[in-house]
Amino acid sequence: MEYMEDTECFAQDDEPYSSDKVYCANCSNCKIVRTLEGNGTQYYLRVRCAAGKWLKKLGGEKFYKYFTVARRSLPFCDSYIPMGEPKEYIKELKNTLPIRDELYQ
Ligand code: SF4
């Protein structure tokens, strides 16, 4: 994951690790972004796919809450750019992610 500025969010159900899946958190197209709150001194963390793979049904880009990023997985992705061995990374990531959507300043 890399850091970028941007906004909005969506979420999906949790799933156990599977070696048959592609994990977005282990892809260099998975970017962490900030969504500003209030007067702009506070923000939430969101993730987006820089390859444009996360889309709303009615059009437009989907953003997900950062604390859910380890859940983002696909059976296959033609734009997946792995950043390392996923199993240990996803395991470690799940241990270090916040457990809820947190407001930062
Ligand atoms: S390019 Fe594919 S694997 Fe990478 S973040 Fe986007 S959807 Fe996930």
Image (cartoon, grey):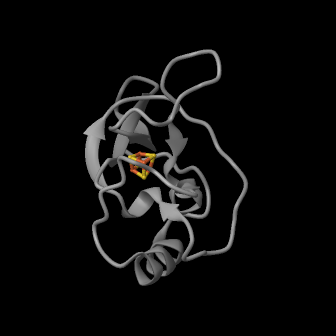
Residue at 42%, 60% in the rendered image: 25
**Whole-percent x and y of residue 101?**
58, 50
In this orientation, which residue lies closer to the viewer: 35 or 10? 10
**Whole-percent x and y of residue 98?**
53, 63
Taking the image as shown, residue 3 lies to the left or right of residue 40, namely left
Task: Please state the total of marks drawn on the protein image.
Answer: 0
In this orientation, which residue lies closer to the viewer: 3 or 41? 3
Quadrant assignment for the C terminus: top left
Residue at 30%, 57% in the rendered image: 81
Residue at 41%, 38% in the rendered image: 43
Residue most extreme to the bottom: 88
Vertical comparison of 14 with 90: above or below: above
**Whole-percent x and y of residue 69?**
51, 56
Vertical comparison of 104 with 37: above or below: below
Taking the image as shown, residue 69 lies to the left or right of residue 4, namely right
Quadrant assignment for the N terminus: bottom left
Residue at 60%, 75% in the rendered image: 18
In this orientation, which residue lies closer to the viewer: 11 or 42? 11
In this orientation, which residue lies closer to the viewer: 39 or 19? 19
Residue most extreme to the right: 13
**Whole-percent x and y of residue 7?**
43, 29
Vertical comparison of 90 with 29: above or below: below
